[in-house]
Each structure stands twice: as C-alpha cells, then as structure tokens.
Image (spheres, rainbow, N blue to C red):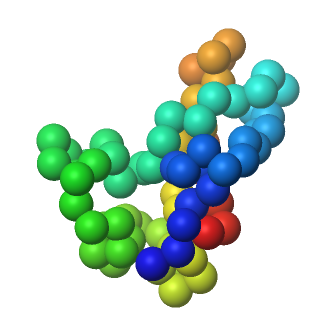
Amino acid sequence: MGVCPLCNGLREVQIFCENCGDRMDDQGKVMDYYGNYSPYMDIDSLKKIDGYETSLKNGECPHLMLCPSCRSERVVLIKE
C-alpha cells in the first residue's frame, strides 16, 4: 500500500477547471463517497472495485476535485 501525498497532507496540487479555468478544490478520495463506512475500509480493497483499472496496479489514489465557481467535478489520479 502506497502513501497518497494529498491524503496525508504532504503536498498540494493545482488542478484547474476545464469549464471555467478556476482552481479546483480537493474533496478527498473518491472511495470515501461510496457509503457510510467506506472512509474506514481498507484502501487497497476499495481500489479493486473503484472503477479505475490502474489505481491499485499503478499505486494511484483517485481524488474528487470540485470547482467552487461552476460546481464542475473531476476525478484526478494522484501517484502514491
């Protein structure tokens, strides 16, 4: 299991909205939104069913980004 630099506060990323160009806000791991207990489950187990084929194999953490201006959402794979 790798260490996600965003989840652990080791770095920040600047992702810009494809619609309006504003800087997007990190909303955390996509898996945290799967259900009430998903934030407490094993991350690697969730990566097997997260819908991102390379996340487990390539050590990537899918993060949900949200644009504060136009409310557009985007998933970005962060290298662990």
Q: Is residue 47 above or below residue 14?
A: below
Can you see residue 40?
A: yes
Which residue is the extreme one toward the left? Answer: 36
The percent position of residue 1, horizontal first and vertical second, equals 45, 78
Looking at the image, which residue is at 59% across and 36% down? 26
**Residue in view at x 54 percent, y 50 percent:** 8
Please give left or right for residue 21 compared with residue 29 in the image.
Answer: right
Residue 14 image offset from top left, x and y in percent: 79, 39
**Residue at image point 69% right, 30% down:** 24
Q: Nearer the viewer, residue 66 or 26?
A: 26
For the question of whether residue 73 can be seen, the reply is no
Q: Residue furthest right?
A: 21
Instruction: Give the vertical position of 78 relative to 16 (above or below).
Output: below
Quadrant hosting residue 16: top right
Position above or below: 58 against 72: below
Find residue 22 and report its horizontal and vertical position in percent.
Answer: 79, 22
Which residue occupies the foreground of this view, 38 or 4?
A: 4
Q: Which one is nearer the viewer's eye here, 1 or 32?
A: 1
In the picture provided, is 65 more to the left or to the right than 35? Answer: right
Quarter of the picture containing the C terminus is bottom right
As drawn, the residue found furthest toward the bottom would be 57
Q: Count the labels in the image.
A: 0
User: Residue at the spot x=31%, y=43% of the render?
Assistant: 33
